[in-house]
Image (cartoon, rainbow, N blue to C red):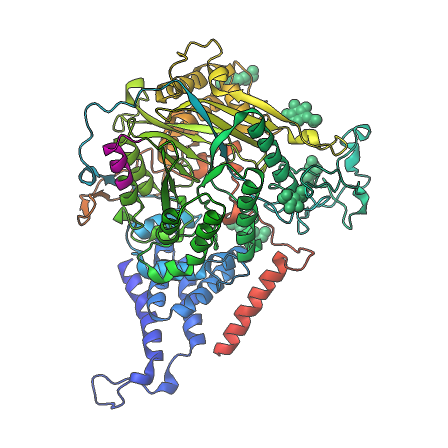
């Protein structure tokens, strides 16, 4: 393999180096003789040879998928160091010729443009920095090449020297017994192009826009209005809150649409679409009424998610900006006297999911506009002061702020651990290339010294789509500062209402009471996308300890708005965590919902079908997609472990481990054993310890254990689910793809 690698690089080197003939030495007798320029490779030849090289790697019989992927990265790296301008062209050409989805090839490798969210520049930068042959390559290929299923064993990380030893007595402070209310909103994902009567049963990843359509023709005689009882009145009304209150609009004839639809998009939304502005306004107005009537929110946390779930090809920079502006101004409009503490979502940036490290000053500057925008906007809305604005503007990875009562809120940018952030694949073993962990530790030590309590908020839970090393670092930090300093952790992103308990026990994985460390609450989404009912919640919070006394969730049955004559959705109280999981009130009323409480709830979900059912109903807020019907109450082994694994695992790795031991049938063994385990101490050079055969380790997993419900992942962009067939409208996928192909062809022509 080494020989192949060297010859790959040599082939390229000859071509690339020789094209720089200006500096050649022309004396044929000199040892530095370079051939005259007419024999040199043109740019077209370089592109062609590089693409050919990539294809040769693909067909090499003696390489497995992961090694092929790493070799392609070698080619990319060499090219990026010599002719970085050619990397997007070479890789999109190779990708399309290799038969991958054309639009996704452009999104991954194509020329970046404000018109769509492609990451060719980011790929080029990252690949020029990374070590394709080592851990960087292993991780990149595992997470970004669907054919590669081997991940090296996660390294052992030792952070002990980053903080003073944990004091022996480290209890959470006492409760005062008086509480105040905090609002938690998550994942609005505003769909600005939501269109009444558009196809809501479409073949693309997000429906209900003018571009949505179903690849299957309607059967003759199909009539949507026959599905719902026509007497109850379908809700195709063009309503609005533009005048500050609900005004039912005109009825729009469902047959007026130019194209027949399987399921015309309703007034207030649909389960395969994101939040229409009308639903957002209705939700915010409802929350405002609760706030004014009796709930009196002291402040709000927002765990991110402003941009809709369209495929990357439909997302441009102006949409990313206008979605954020719409949502944040909307919060302020409806709740002008409630300060919001937002966390930036993984998709709330353009290109989506990206975040360069601050030390990559050039790349970081390319994204500066995003942080300038947010720090200006949040300051204008009165939520942050100048100091915090500066932190947001210049750190990019998060900020901390202190509420009027002295609670510290630390908001982290979860693209740091997002597997879709290409920059996270550069120097993966360096532990803190973003500087975020040092920031977090400093903040926590400061709070520890000052007897201050802390909430941590972020968008992406470390139990989903998260890289193992940052996840492990975060987990160790949480362990060090729990339970005394960290009072609560909040996430969003997955749309489902869940919680994750963190257990210690050094890999013993016993999940016993004495091993519990802390827990995270995952807020339900406003957006119904992925089959959930819109929901939001508030917490009653103890004034002294800032621990959570109870959590109250509200929801609306979206399907009841499909045939209700266009009336406003009814918001209902869903549940109080205390009442739902402890109906007999056995938990002492003076105790908060601490880790021990969630530990007992987890065990009830594991052992008692009624609680397991409640958990699932809460997860989906009793939408028609609640995965509960397949499970009879006595006979439900598979789903048993699934819900328990979800709530009792803090990280992706632990959840997989849990699923694997509970249900070995879903386990697919890796193709080859993995041959090294690195041991990381921050600020020391990396050692590779011996060669261990970990071929039988449960945690070198494949993604395929994911269950039905889980696989309805709402970040569809890396999947090939978007149809690349014809779309009707301009600005459509087809147009963009054609534009791109033309770009490539003309680029090639220009080069010839
Ligand atoms: C991606 O989609 C295209 C077009 O629908 C299809 O031809 C191709 O096989 C798909 N690729 C994968 C990996 O599913
Ligand atoms: C939503 O509310 C905003 C602020 O009042 C308003 O400008 C906008 O027109 C409303 N949109 C709809 C669809 O109700
Ligand atoms: C959605 O479309 C599919 C065809 O793509 C069809 O089989 C299914 O019945 C439709 N469902 C609804 C609710 O319209
Ligand atoms: C909405 O969905 C729920 C859950 O499937 C169901 O119980 C309810 O009857 C539905 N409501 C309407 C109006 O269809
Ligand atoms: C579940 O019930 C079905 C039908 O009653 C039965 O065939 C199956 O063996 C049961 N599964 C388990 C794991 O008990």
Between 257 and 342, which is closer to the camera in this rendering? 342
Number of numbered labels in the structure image: 0
x, y (%) of residue 322?
56, 52
Q: Classify residue 572 by image quadrant.
A: top right
- 269 w.r.t. 591: above or below: below
- 152 w.r.t. 170: above or below: below
Magenta stretch: give its range.
Answer: 442-452
In this orientation, does residue 208 appear?
no
Residue found at x 58% / y 44% = 190
- 580 w.r.t. 740: above or below: above
Q: Is residue 157 left or right of residue 545?
A: left
x, y (%) of residue 261?
74, 44
Q: Is residue 682 left or right of residue 62?
A: left
Q: Classify residue 489 by image quadrant.
A: top left
Q: Is residue 99 left or right of residue 670?
A: right
- 657 w.r.t. 371: above or below: above
| Prevailing secondary structure of the magenta residues | helix
Quarter of the figure with the N terminus: bottom left
Between 408 and 5, which is closer to the camera in this rendering? 408
x, y (%) of residue 450?
25, 33
In this orientation, does residue 450 appear?
yes
Q: Residue 352 colored magenta?
A: no
Q: Classify residue 527 by image quadrant.
A: top right
Q: Is residue 205 left or right of residue 261?
A: left
Between 711 and 476, which is closer to the camera in this rendering? 476
């Amino acid at each position: 393999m080494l020989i192949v690698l060297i010859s790959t690089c040599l082939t390229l080197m000859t071509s690339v180096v020789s094209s720089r003939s200006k500096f050649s030495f022309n004396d044929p007798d000199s040892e530095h003789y370079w051939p005259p320029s007419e024999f040199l490779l043109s740019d077209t030849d370089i592109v062609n040879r590089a693409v050919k090289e990539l294809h040769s790697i693909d067909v090499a019989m003696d390489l497995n998928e992961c090694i092929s992927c790493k070799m392609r990265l070698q080619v990319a790296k060499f090219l990026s160091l010599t002719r970085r301008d050619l990397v997007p062209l070479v890789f999109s050409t190779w990708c399309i010729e290799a038969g991958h989805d054309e639009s996704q090839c452009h999104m991954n490798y194509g020329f970046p443009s404000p018109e769509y969210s492609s990451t060719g520049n980011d790929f080029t930068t990252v690949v020029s920095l990374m070590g394709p042959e080592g851990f960087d390559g292993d991780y990149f290929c595992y997470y970004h090449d669907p054919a590669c299923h081997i991940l090296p064993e996660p390294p052992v990380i030792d952070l002990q020297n980053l903080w003073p030893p944990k004091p022996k007595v480290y209890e959470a402070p006492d409760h005062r017994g008086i509480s105040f209310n905090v609002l938690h909103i998550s994942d609005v994902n505003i769909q600005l192009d939501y269109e009444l009567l558009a196809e809501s049963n479409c073949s693309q990843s997000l429906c209900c826009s003018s571009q949505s359509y179903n690849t299957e023709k309607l059967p003759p005689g199909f009539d949507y209005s026959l599905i719902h009882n026509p007497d109850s009145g379908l809700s195709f009304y063009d309503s609005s809150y533009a005048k500050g209150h609900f005004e039912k609009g005109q009825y729009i004839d469902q047959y007026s649409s130019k194209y027949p639809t399987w399921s015309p998009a309703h007034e207030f939304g649909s389960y395969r679409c994101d939040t229409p502005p009308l639903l957002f306004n209705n939700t915010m107005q409802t929350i405002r009424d609760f706030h004014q009537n009796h709930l009196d929110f002291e402040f709000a946390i927002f765990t991110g998610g402003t941009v809709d779930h369209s495929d990357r090809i439909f997302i441009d920079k102006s949409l990313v900006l206008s979605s954020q502006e719409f949502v944040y101004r909307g919060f302020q409009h409806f709740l002008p006297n409630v300060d919001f503490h937002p966390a930036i979502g993984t998709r709330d940036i353009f290109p989506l999911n990206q975040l360069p490290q601050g030390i990559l000053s050039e790349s970081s500057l390319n994204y500066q506009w995003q942080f300038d925008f947010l720090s200006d906007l949040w300051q204008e809305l009165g939520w942050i002061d100048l100091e915090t604005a500066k932190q947001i503007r210049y750190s990019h990875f998060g900020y901390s702020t202190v509420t009027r009562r002295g609670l510290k809120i630390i908001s982290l940018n979860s693209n740091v651990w997002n597997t879709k952030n290409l920059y996270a694949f550069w120097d993966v073993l360096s532990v803190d290339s973003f500087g975020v962990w040092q920031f977090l530790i400093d903040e926590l030590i400061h709070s520890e010294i000052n007897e201050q309590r802390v909430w941590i908020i972020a968008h992406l839970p470390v139990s989903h789509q998260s890289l193992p090393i940052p996840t492990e670092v975060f987990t160790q930090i949480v362990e060090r500062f729990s339970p005394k300093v960290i009072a609560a952790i909040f996430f969003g992103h997955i749309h489902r209402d869940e919680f994750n308990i963190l257990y210690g026990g050094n890999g013993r994985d016993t999940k016993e009471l004495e091993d519990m460390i802390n827990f995270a609450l995952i807020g339900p989404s406003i957006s119904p996308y992925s089959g959930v009912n819109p929901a939001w919640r508030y917490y009653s919070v103890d004034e002294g300890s800032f621990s959570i006394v109870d959590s109250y969730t509200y929801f609306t049955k979206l399907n009841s708005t499909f045939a209700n004559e266009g009336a406003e959705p009814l918001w209902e109280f869903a549940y109080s965590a205390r009442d739902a999981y402890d109906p007999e009130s056995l938990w002492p009323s003076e105790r908060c919902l601490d880790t021990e409480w969630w530990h007992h709830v987890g065990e009830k979900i594991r052992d008692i079908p009624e609680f397991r059912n409640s958990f699932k109903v809460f997860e989906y807020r009793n939408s028609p997609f609640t995965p509960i019907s397949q499970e009879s109450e006595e006979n439900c082994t598979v789903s048993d472990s699934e819900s328990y694994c979800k709530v009792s695992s803090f990280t992706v790795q632990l959840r997989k481990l849990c699923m694997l031991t509970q249900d070995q049938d879903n386990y697919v063994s890796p193709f080859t054993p993995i041959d090294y385990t690195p041991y990381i101490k921050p600020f020391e050079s990396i050692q590779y310890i011996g060669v261990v055969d970990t071929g039988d380790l449960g945690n070198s997993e494949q993604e395929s254990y994911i269950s039905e419900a889980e696989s309805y992942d709402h970040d569809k962009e890396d999947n090939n689910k978007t149809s690349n067939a014809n779309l009707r409208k301009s600005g459509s996928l087809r147009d963009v793809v054609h534009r791109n192909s033309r770009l490539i062809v003309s680029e090639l022509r220009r080069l010839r």
